[in-house]
C-alpha cells in the first residue's frame, strides 16, 4: 500500500488475487482510488451466482462498494425467480429495495426519462454507478460512496 501511496501501481494479477483484502485495507486507511481500482477489478473478475449473491451484497454494503453492490443487484434482478426460491433475503441491506428498483428501471430503459430539472437528462436515481462516478469526477466531486452519496 505504501508503494501505491507514493505513486506506484498495483499489478493487475495482485489486484485480482487480493481484491477484497485491498478493499479492506484501502477502506480502513481512506485510500479511495486504490479501493475503487480493487472494487472494479473484483467486479470484473468475480462470477456472481445465486449461492454467493447475498455475500457480495452484504460485503458491498459493509464496505460501501457501490459498483459491486450494483453488479450483485443486477444479478438478483436478472435471476429473480431462482433467487426468490433459493436465497433468504432477511439479511439484505436496508437500501436493497431502492437498488433493485433502479436496476429494474435501467433494464426497462426508463433511466432516460426527465430528471425534473433538465429535459432529456437521465434520472440520477436510476443511472449506473459508473455513470454517476464519471459525472461526479467531471465535476471534481468525490467518487467513492453509495448511490445516494453520488
Image: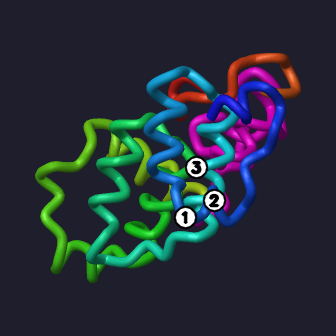
Circle 3: is it few (<14), some (14-19), or many (20+) Cα within 10 Å? Answer: many
Q: Where are the magenta residues, as a range?
A: 107-136
Could you tell me if residue 33 is visible in this image?
yes
Q: Quick one: which residue is furthest to the front in this view? A: 3
Could you tell me if residue 127 is visible in this image?
no
**In this figure, which residue is indicated by the disc labeled 2?**
14
The answer to whether the residue labelled 2 contacts the one labelled 3, judged by CB atoms less than 8 Å apart, is no
- State how far apart marks 2 and 1 are (Cα): 5 Å
Q: Quick one: which residue is furthest to the right in this view? A: 138
Circle 1: is it few (<14), some (14-19), or many (20+) Cα within 10 Å? Answer: some
Query: Splitting the image into 4 quarters, where does residue 105 fall?
Result: bottom right
Q: Position of residue 145 (x, y in %)?
A: 55, 28
- State how far apart marks 2 and 3 are (Cα): 13 Å
Residue 18 within the magenta-colored segment of the rendering: no
Q: Which of marks 3 and 1 is nearer the N terminus?
A: 1
Secondary structure beneath disc 1? helix
- Position of 124 compared to 43: left or right? right
Residue at position x 49%, y 64% in the image: 74
The answer to whether the residue labelled 2 contacts the one labelled 1, judged by CB atoms less than 8 Å apart, is yes
Q: Is residue 9 above or below residue 74?
A: above
Secondary structure beneath disc 3? helix
Amino acid at each position: 500500500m505504501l508503494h501505491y501511496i507514493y505513486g506506484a501501481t498495483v499489478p493487475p494479477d495482485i489486484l485480482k488475487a487480493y481484491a477484497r483484502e485491498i478493499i479492506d485495507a484501502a477502506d480502513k486507511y481512506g485510500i479511495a482510488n486504490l479501493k475503487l481500482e480493487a472494487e472494479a477489478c473484483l467486479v470484473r473478475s468475480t462470477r456472481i451466482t445465486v449461492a454467493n449473491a447475498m455475500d457480495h451484497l452484504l460485503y458491498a454494503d459493509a464496505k460501501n462498494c457501490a459498483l459491486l453492490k450494483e453488479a450483485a443487484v443486477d444479478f438478483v434482478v436478472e435471476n429473480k425467480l431462482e433467487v426468490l426460491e433459493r436465497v433468504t433475503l432477511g439479511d439484505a441491506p436496508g437500501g436493497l429495495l431502492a437498488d433493485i428498483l433502479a436496476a429494474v428501471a435501467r433494464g426497462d430503459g426508463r433511466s432516460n426519462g426527465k430528471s425534473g430539472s433538465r429535459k432529456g437528462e437521465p434520472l440520477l436515481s436510476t443511472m449506473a454507478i459508473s455513470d454517476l462516478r464519471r459525472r461526479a469526477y467531471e465535476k471534481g466531486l468525490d467518487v467513492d460512496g453509495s448511490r445516494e452519496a453520488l
